[in-house]
Amino acid sequence: MVRFLIFLLFSAWAIVSAVGVVTFSNPIYVIIWLLSCLIAVAGIFFTAGAELVGALQLLIYAVAIAVFYVFVLTAVPWEKAVKKDSHYRTEGVLSLPLVLLLYLEMVVVFLLGVVASPEGKFREAIAKIGNAEVVGSVLFTKYFFAFEVVSVVLLVGMIGAVLIGRKESQTYEDDTA
C-alpha cells in the first residue's frame, strides 16, 4: 500500500511537471520543469522495482540531457531569434489523432504487460541473479544486433551534429567580418 501511495505521489509530480513544460514560454522555466519531470519519472522506476532503469534515467536524462539543454540555451543568440506570439492551432488540431493513437498504444502495451506479468517470465531470473544482470543478459544476447545498430546510428548523428555545428560557426564568423 505504501509503494502504491509513493507511486501516486511520483505520478502526480510527473504530470504537474509535464504540464509545466508545455505551458511555460520562458526556456529557463521549461528546462527546470523538464528536469523535475525526469526526476519524478526516475522515482516511478525506483518505485516499480526497476532500479537500473531509474538510475539510467537519472544519469542520462536528468543530468546529461538537462546539461545539454542548458548549453543550447546559452549558445543560441536569443536577440536574433524571431518571437512568434501566435500558437499553431491548425497543427495542434491535425496532430490530435496521432497523439490519441499514441496514447491508445501506451494503454494496449500497459495492459499486455499486466497480462504477461503474472506468467513470471523474468521473476526467477531476477530473484536469482539481479535486475541489472537480467537486463544486460537479455540486451546482449537477444537484442545484440539492434543494440549495435542503435550505437552506430547515434555515432553518425553525433558526427553530423559536429559537422553542422562547425559549418554554422563558420557562417557566424563570416557574417561578423
Image (cartoon, grey):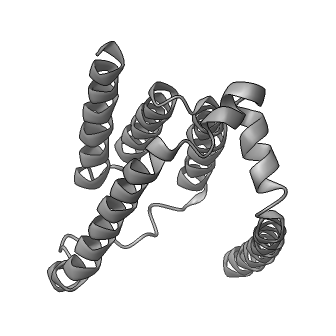
Q: Quadrant of residue 108?
A: bottom left
Q: Quadrant of residue 57?
A: top right
Q: In the displayed structure, would residue 17 be above or below residue 65? A: above
Identify which residue is drawn at 57% across, 33% down. Answer: 50
Q: Which residue is more in the foreground, 103 or 133?
A: 133
Q: In the displayed structure, would residue 93 be above or below residue 28? A: below
Identify which residue is drawn at 60% across, 35% down. Answer: 123
Q: Quadrant of residue 79?
A: bottom left
Most extreme residue toward the top, as rendered? Answer: 2
Q: Which residue is more in the foreground, 11 or 92?
A: 11
Is 9 placed left or right of 138 in the picture? left
Indicate the position of residue 121 as horizontal and vertical percent values: 60, 46
Indicate the position of residue 160 as horizontal and vertical percent values: 77, 77
Indicate the position of residue 107 as horizontal and vertical percent values: 30, 60
Where is the C terminus found, in terms of image quarters?
bottom right
Where is the N terminus found, in terms of image quarters?
top left
Is 112 placed left or right of 22 in the picture? right
Q: In the displayed structure, would residue 27 be above or below residue 47? A: below
Q: Which residue is more in the foreground, 74 or 24?
A: 24
Q: In the displayed structure, would residue 133 be above or below residue 128? A: below
Indicate the position of residue 130 as horizontal and vertical percent values: 73, 28
Q: How many marks?
A: 0
Is 122 placed left or right of 170 in the picture? left
Q: Which residue is more in the foreground, 80 or 126?
A: 126
Most extreme residue toward the front, as rendered? Answer: 119
